[in-house]
Amino acid sequence: MPAPLGSLRECREALDQGRTSSAALVEQSLARAEAHAHLSAFVRLRAERARAEAQEADRRRAQGEVRSPLDGIPLAVKDNLVRAGEETTCASRILEGFVSPYTSGVLERIEAAGAISIGSTNMDEFAMGSSTEHSVYGPSRNPWDPARTPGGSSGGSAAAVAAGIVPMALGSDTGGSIRQPAGFCGVVGVKPTYGRVSRWGLVAFASSLDQVGAFARSAEDAAHVLDAIAGHDPRDSTSIPEPAPSCAAALDGDVAGLVVGLPREYYAADGIEPGVLDAVREACAQLERAGAKLREVSLPHSEHAVATYYLIATAEASSNLARYDGVRYGHRAQGAHSLSEMYERTRSEGFGAEVKRRILLGTYVLSAGYYDAYYRKAQQVRTLIRRDFEQAFRGCDVIATPTMPETAFRLGERTEDPLRMYLSDVYTVSANLAGLPGVSLPCGFSEGMPVGLQLLAPPLEEARLLRVADAYQRHTAHHLARPPEPA
Amino acid sequence: MTGVPHPRYEVVIGLEVHAQLRTRSKLFSPAPVTYGAEPNHSVHPVCLALPGVLPVLNGHAVELAIRVALASQCHVHPQSIFARKNYFYPDLPKGYQISQYEEPLATGGWLDVRMPDGNGGERKRVRLHRIHMEEDAGKSIHDAAVAGDATHVDLNRAGVALLEIVSEPDLRSPAEAAAYLRALRSLLRYVDASDADMERGNFRCDANISLRRHGESRLGTRTELKNLNSFRFVEAALEAEIRRQASLLDAGEKVVQATLQFDPASGRTRVLRLKENADDYRYFPDPDLVPLVLSDAQIERVRKTLPEQADARCERFQRQQGLPEEDARLLCESRALADFFEAAAKRHGDAETLVNWIRRDVLHALGEHGIEIEASRLTPEALADLVERVRQGGVTAQSARALIPELVLSGGDPLRLIQERGLEAVSDTGELEAAVDAVLREHAGHVERLRAGEEKVRNFLIGQVMKRTGGKADPAALRRVLAQRLGEGGS
């Protein structure tokens, strides 16, 4: 068994000191991925390309040219970010064999920074799910307990970082799809402000909620990844036109006087696993000991967040996924005798059950006669939720919550109960509805499984968010814990 | 029956026009806008709806749309929203069309349209309900010769910028509808927003039509006529639909709300689908696009770039150049033609003569070649020079007219052409006398008849001399010589 890769910082220091090479890191990473095939973290490796890019990176470094703190270091990429000339499937049969002619804005940036993708990671089909079980490639597994889910939808990316296959990975977060698996797998997962990272080339699930973000072993590492991918992209009309300030440069370890808001409604909710609540309370106490102040805040419309989220997300998804019709690319059913038969069979064969469920829901939500009651109402509640946060942030600098009310559940346990799966998104979806940046940090264990602490900040305050997360990690060691090596 | 009111029913028509905006790239995609390109060659990942692509609004399209809205007195909204109109069709790559729905770009304008002579030739104000931007679909090709029993899809047109202009139901006859369409086409061309060429499909019309008893204030049930793709079809289709609806009403039956298509072969309208089967388009604001926000300053900046409007120009031509209204109107139907005339009139002061040349010769030559004035190689200066030369007697009108088709097609300096081809008018008496003498010898019988007082024979003889001189004889000189040789006058 090849040794786990170190953190991004450890890899960088080893490269800087000449103790290793990009080629060696990539080999280690690829071997580690092979050795962890049982996790199904990856759906595709790009071994030869990664090796060639590693040699290129080593050549650069030998000539004294280092592009960024990510240069020459292995990366994993969720299978919903397109890259020219390579397959992207979103873990869906309908995109089987689809090769994009263009590259996503995020991959352009992270490649310009020198990071080397070793492959594409597993996910819930079209990022719809919280367990990575809804994948045409089968479920991913949690490195802490392979009988359990790594979470989702970016479960493959979270598992790959947790298992020490790569020190960093890219994911996307529409309702918690980065933070939730980060919490379940005991790694750091950051979702930036909506519009901070380009969506150009991110295969859409719900356009007004989708945001690309990063997994890493520490807040500091995540800050470097975010610095590499954030910034304006004119190809995305919702991209924030201002330049993104460096997050890594803001990590001074200082939280003295910082006010941490604790939403009354979140902590009062039934159904939080006691071990989770204990770990999160202890994390807040730790921040207090480091000089921060704790203050109760209120988010009065929280109880409507999950319903609002599922109305908006499914409505947008039903429209975004209409393009998968078998006409131009991807799967097309054979032998259809009419246009409608071709559509029906193509989409029936191509999409999995969860995607179909959400397309049906979303189609209903937008239908004449229901639009006002569902979609328009949901948008109104969304505005109220955004205002809740504006109000709350008048009294605090960041908000601290559990990432999830529970730890990773067993595979298969929720597949027959989608509603229960949806309801567990209660703490994560609000950040997407309000467009806020959020991060999940490892903050301990409950019955042997990692617990995530979620921090939220006002829009564009990623630097503040990661400064607090980094300060917490300077005082704690939860993020250094590693899952057991497989036998 | 054009312009004649229906004996029993009042006809109520509103039109929806789709005009292709004159942009270099598509409404939300960098793909170039082409005409007649290889199928699926004017495309880009955005208009192919590949996974992960996002729309970015074309600023030039917005500017052109604002020009049209301002030129038609519309209120341009400080904020408008792009929405998704969801439906499945192979030539609609995303499975939705981006259009404006609840919050359009502009509302509430009007066009003052000169109605056909049957309606007294009066101006009528046709109100505009709304103007909005949207993207075009691609083209499905069912032609068996091309596609066999399959359907082929050409996405060159998919995503091209369209402006939809919806009138209020203010039109009362097919002729009024046609007059409105012509006025709208002229406006679109005037402000450079669209080529508005029906034959190329960049000016398309749907019509809503209903009948009601004269004096009734409630609107009758309307039907929608789709894809009326020539001015002739618009009138013919509306006439056919009036006949269909009138015969239903006459028989005491009800008009059912439906979408119909006109079949030019049979001259009848055919029901495509009934309203009950109407699609639910599930409109909602496109989350990939931000609201289009326009400041007063931006709108005013566009307003400053607007050219003089056709109506104002037409009045100015009558006032300044002393043109009859009919001529002024003809010139102002096309901004390019009006520009041509004005440039020519600047060089040659006799506006009325110029207009005659333009009407009689230039427009005729354009028609013969099947081109628009914009494509003509005849410069206004060249026409002015030619007309001046005729006035001076340096060339006969006949020779000059013969040059116009060539000038329109190939251009060139008319004065040099006259010289090179030896078309100078023959006023040399010796040469003329010889020609006249020869004609008088050949046509002794006609000479007798003329002498006997049959004056119309004179023109025949003049014609014969012209023919002999290849049309170059200066007419005044010719008349003089002929009179002399016939021994008339005695001067």
Image (cartoon, coloured by chain):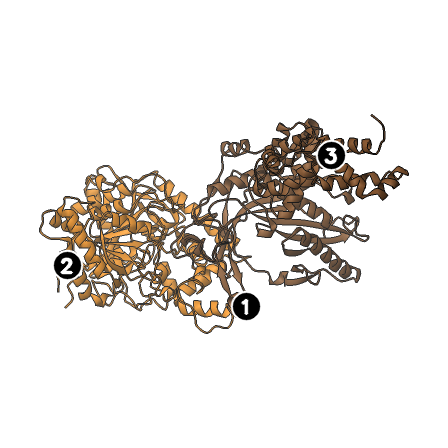
Chain colours: A orange, B brown
**Given contact means CB atoms under 8 Å apart, are the residues at marks 2 and 3 in contact?**
no
Mark 2 and mark 3: Cα distance apart in space: 111 Å
**Given contact means CB atoms under 8 Å apart, are the residues at marks 3 and 1 in contact?**
no
Nearer to us in this view, A297 or B335:
B335
Q: Tell me which residue sits at (61%, 50%) in the image.
A: B198
Q: Provide residue A39's location: percent of width, then percent of height.
A: 23, 65
Nearer mark to the viewer, of 3 and 1: 3
Nearer to us in this view, B215 or B409:
B409
Q: Tell me which residue sits at (62%, 31%) in the image.
A: B385
> Please, what secondary structure does the residue beneath circle 2 have?
loop
- Quadrant placement of the C terminus of chain A: bottom left
Question: Residue A171, relative to residue A228: is it above or below?
Answer: below
Chain ID, mark 3 = B
Nearer mark to the viewer, of 2 and 3: 3
**Given contact means CB atoms under 8 Å apart, are the residues at marks 1 and 2 in contact?**
no
Residue at which label 2 appears: A4
Nearer mark to the viewer, of 1 and 2: 1
| First along the sequence among labels 3 and 1 | 1
Q: In the rendering, which numbered label is found on residue B144? A: 1
Residue at which label 3 appears: B432
Residue at the right extreme, as displayed: B452
